[in-house]
Amino acid sequence: MLGVGTFIDDEGGYTTVAVAVALLLSVSLVFSAASAQWVSARSGEVQQVADAAAASGANAVAAYATIAQTLDACVLSMGLAGMVTCGAGLVASCVPPLAATGAELVSCGTQVLSARRDFSRSAASGLRTLEAALPAIVVSNSAACVLANSEEGLAYAGCAVPFPQRSQSDFSALEADVDDSAAEQLAQQMRELAAKEREAKERADAARERGWRADCGERPYCLWQRAQTLAGLGDGENPCYPSADSWSFGAPLQRARAYYAARLGSCSVDGPGAEQLTDDVCRRAFYEFALGEVRRGSYAESPDGGVEIDLPSLPHNADETRATTLYTDAAWPCSAAEGGRVLHSSMKCPGADGGFCGTASLADLEAGSVLKCGECRMSVGELGRAAAASTSIENGFEHWWREVVEASKDYQKAKKEEVEARKQLKEKAEQGSDMFKRAIDALTVTRPKLCPPGAYGCVAVVARGEAAAVPSELTSVFLSAAALPPGAAVSGAALAPDDSTAENNVLASFFDGVSADGSLAGSMADGVATLWGRLLVGYGSAYGSVAEAGGGFLDKLDGVLGGSAGSWLKRRLGEIMETCGLTPSDMRLRKPVLVNTREILGQAGYDKASTVRGLINELPDSGDVSAYVRAFAGWALDTYGDEDFTVAELTVPGTELKIPLKVNLKKLAGAL
């Protein structure tokens, strides 16, 4: 019988047997610990595979989110670019020299909006289709990830399931139309009114120039020079204006009042003979009449730019005299005679020897009610000749007054037409402003509400089969054979913005891609493609970029003068863009992060335990995982066509060219 002596000798030391047993036990413990460590390490890998599967499923949702946001940015920025271009066209239509540019811009803007209309509809349809395929893509992509981790004797089966499982997105905002039907007609009306305003202004300016020349600008004679020479008026009563810019029709009116007052005050009636007496009396009567007329005359400017001018026309012959009070007023003295009363120019007339016998008018004389004097021969013809000479020749004051009066009538008529055209143009500009605001509001107030499958997150369930055995090199000598028991793990992943991608503008790369061949920019008016690019790239901070990019585009319209309808409309459109209320979009790329599955399932309205249990029961045998991947990926590809799925088609404005925007479903689904 073996006893203690077998292991300890008589001297108290260990025997060879004791050393051999100790070594055998130590080696057995080392291999047992290594086996336990292997089992522990490999059994925990199922959780890592589940985490990877959940992240893989969420990656497919992240790819969809990038696609959807890019398409929304295109639709929004194209709408804004089209409306800003139409707005610029309306502004240019208010300025006659820019009429051709305005027509081109409005046409280009409506083409952009038409392209946006087609693109938004195809994008909405494509996103619906892509969302319908997204659950299968999530399952296929995650199952492929699980399959890729089945190696070294360990077989896994599992996949990720998106929650919600069905789309809850609302794409109605993408399909909302922008009403630009009235833009071209409105621009045409504005161009016509602007041309009418300009033509009236040119006529008014020409009439003003004529009036100024007659008053101050002609040499050697003009109204100013005649007033200075004939009436001796000084600069205070008779100012000279160096140009028409500082002159108005009120100036000759004031000059005429001073002139006729001076001429009347210096006019004497003391001719030596009857004929001279008649000339003096007629001249005095004319000056008195003219002074009364010009004093009743008026000139006033309205705040809207219109004028009210009443410069009296003075008679310069007998016919015109008959149309005045000089003809109808009973202002002429009469004397008694055998045949009746005789009308004289003055009672100083040698023929007025019968004594004063009341007054009569020249109309009475021509009607035969009174007789004509044979000495002074006073008649309407004599009175008409008083102004005829000075009106018919260039050195007469009345000649230039007549020129001023005729110019004032043309000026008033042209200014009235100019003001009316400007008023109508302002009304059209207000209509354009209202149309622009409605369109911008329609574009910016409502955006698509995206809630695709997987928006809450993806839950992955992965199971490990029984085939995995502990490596024989760890068990064959010292331990009995052992196998890794079955196991399962659950994991959840949701999308979170990646701060490191804040400056990674995917939209800039997208725009560079669609415009790389030059066909996009070449088909649009100068600067419009650049405008769209700025609005597209600025989608992440669109509330600021709209005013900046749109305002910069409007500022390129040279020749829009302040105070005009075009200037008002330009400023108003800028204000609308500044206050359009477009909130910024978060353009950071999304990446999967692991989260508690309870958060995902709870948000989707599911119970965690029962849902996970049901998912585990649905898992295929480990040997069928490859077929599982092919089944889901194949369904997506068979249902939605080629491996390259066209999500939307971008029509190049003004052409029949369409740029397809494609997604490779095979790569997205992880198909084998």
Image: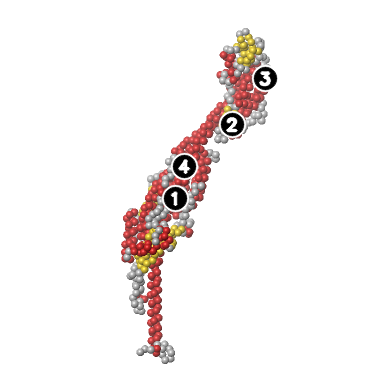
Numbered-mark total: 4
Residue drawn where x is 52% and y is 41% of the image: 568
Residue 353 point in image, percent of width and height: 66, 10
Label 2: state its secondary structure.
strand
Give the SS element for disc 3.
Answer: loop
Distance from Cα at disc 3 to Cα at disc 2: 35 Å
Alpha-carbon neighbours of circle 3 within 10 Å: few (<14), some, or many (≥20)? few
Q: Does the CB distance between marks 2 and 4 fall below 8 Å?
A: no
Distance of label 1 from label 4 (alpha carbons): 20 Å
Most distant residue in the top direction: 338
- Residue with the mark numbered 2: 300
Quadrant in the picture for residue 233? top right
Q: Which residue is mark 4?
A: 435
Q: Is residue 220 visible?
A: no
The reply to whether dot 3 and dot 2 touch (C-beta < 8 Å) is: no
Q: Earlier in the sequence, mark 2 or mark 4?
A: 2
Work out how far the residue at label 4 is from the one at label 3, CA to CA, in angstroms. 71 Å
Pointer 1 with pointer 3, Cβ within 8 A: no
Neighbourhood count class around disc 1 (C-alpha, 10 Å): few under 14, some 14–19, many 20 upward: some
Expressed as whole percent of the image width and height from the top left, the position of residue 287 reads 63, 22
Q: Of callouts 1 and 4, which one flags the residue occurring earlier in the amino acid sequence?
A: 4
Residues at marks 2 and 1, CA–CA distance in whole angstroms: 55 Å
Indicate which disc, 3 or 2, sits on the residue closer to the N terminus: 3
Residue 244 or 23: which is nearer the viewer? 23
Residue ID for mark 3: 268
